[in-house]
Image (cartoon, rainbow, N blue to C red):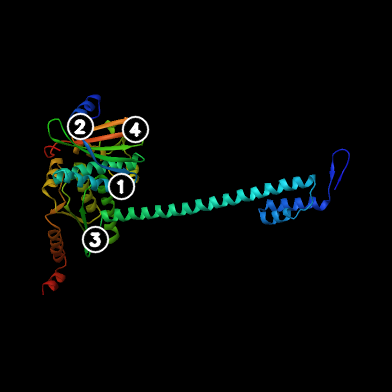
Amino acid sequence: MASVGTMETLETAAAAAAATAVTTMRVAVDEWGDVAIARHQARRLARQHGVAPRRAGEVAIVVSELASNIVKYGVRGEIAVEVGGSAAGGMTLAVMAHDVGPPIYDLEIAMLDGHDDRGPIDPAVLAQRGGLGTGLGAVSRLADRLEVRQEAGGKLIIATFYRGLPPGA
Amino acid sequence: MATDGEGAIAIEETRLMRIIEALSYASIEDYDSCLSLLRSLGTSDSFSELETAFTIFIEELAEAKRQLREALANTEVANRELAAKLATIEMQQAAIRDLSTPIIEVWSGVICLPVVGIVDSQRSADMTETLLETIIAKQARTAIVDITGIDVMDTKTADHFIKMAKAVRLLGADCIISGINPGIAQTLTHIGVDLTGIRTLRSLRDALQVHLRETEQLHPIRGAEAAS
């Protein structure tokens, strides 16, 4: 189950991510074409690191949802994927989505399906904006941990996978 | 030209008229006529200093105007190029969207949407819209959504897929989902969706066969013709 970024989870995240973490993919995102590029690169990368097809597909969905959100809300940003080893010896894969858009007003609400960061999305707004309003919910369901770091002039969302990955990086 | 004791000057009216004429040329931005008029001045006296200063001013103004026009022209060219590039990008994006939801009319009244690659919430929403619009546009009676190429989906997206199938029924068409793999099957049962009224078949081939068999039953004469 994914947890929300508190100080405690940030520390455990830092402990889990070993010093061996390497950025293996970086894609600038500011339009829909970039979303497709990020999605395909992420899947290929996960497969290259020995991740099973289903799990690699889940990584790709998470990348796709986060990249779509950058296009919809974040103005522009980038997606990076880091592959590393956990302290326990397993492989970790972190999807990092950074953008220069406004902060998430309320993360707990934003993670609910059919909601954005302020509350339920009006069907008319949803039709115009596209999608289902379930992106961040999907990210929290598919990844093992979700952290959001609000920063001055933007935000960083880190979705980490460590379950169901091959042993060792 | 004459000078009186008070320091005032008197000049020929023609010289003054020439300056006024030059100024009027300058005001309509005809700098060539303006300057040729000013350069024809020959006399050298205190008034000619004003004439020379005026000439230099006009020359500089003409040059500044020329540079401005050039810069504007360059900007316009750059803008046109940018607009052309943006149009290309928009076209490519539309092409990508079309490719991600290719709807094929496989038989009269039967449309097929083969779903391949990775389906996220955005694609799922786009597909629903395109499929429902195509059913109306092609007056399709059956829509086959083949998801053989999909091995993973978020639960909420899978749920939305089932809702899409129900929306197809609301439009008066049948929706068949074919090629559900074990992973997706588990996702669907896990979230406990209601599958009543939605036919699921193993492959696109099965889906087509079922459709054809039913059409024959509805139109026995055509079926007999086909058999003979």
Could you tell me which quadrant the N terminus of chain A lies in?
top left
Along the line of sight, the residue nearer the viewer: A132 or A81: A81
Residue A121 in percent (x, y) is at 31, 38
Circle 2 SS class: loop
Separation of marks 2 and 3 at Cα, in angstroms: 50 Å
> In the rendered image, which residue does mark 4 sit on?
A103
Mark 4 or mark 2, which is nearer to you?
A: 2
For the point 40% across and 54% down, the residue is B87
| Count of picture labels | 4
**Label 4 SS:** loop
Q: Where is residue B104 in the image (x, y as percent from the top left)?
A: 24, 61
Callout 2, which amino acid? Ala
Q: Which amino acid does label 1 sit on?
A: Asp
Q: Which of marks 2 and 3 is in front?
A: 2
Q: Give the residue pinned by disc 3.
A: B104
Residue visible at 33% across and 53% down? B93
- The residue tagged 1 is A34
Mark 2 or mark 1, whichever is nearer to me: 2
Q: Which of B202 and B116 is in front in this view?
A: B116
Asked if badges 3 and 1 are on one and the same chain, I answer no
Tag 2 residue: A19
User: Is residue A134 among what the camera can see?
Assistant: no
In the image, farthest residue toward the right: B5
**Nearer to us: label 3 or label 1:** 1
Q: How crowded is mark 3: few (under 14 residues within 10 Å), some or many (20 or more)?
A: some
The first of marks 1 and 4 along the sequence is 1
Is the residue B131 above or below the residue A141 in the image?
below
Given residues B120 and B159, the one toward you in this image is: B120
Kindly check if marks 2 and 1 are in contact, taking CB atoms under 8 A apart as contact: no
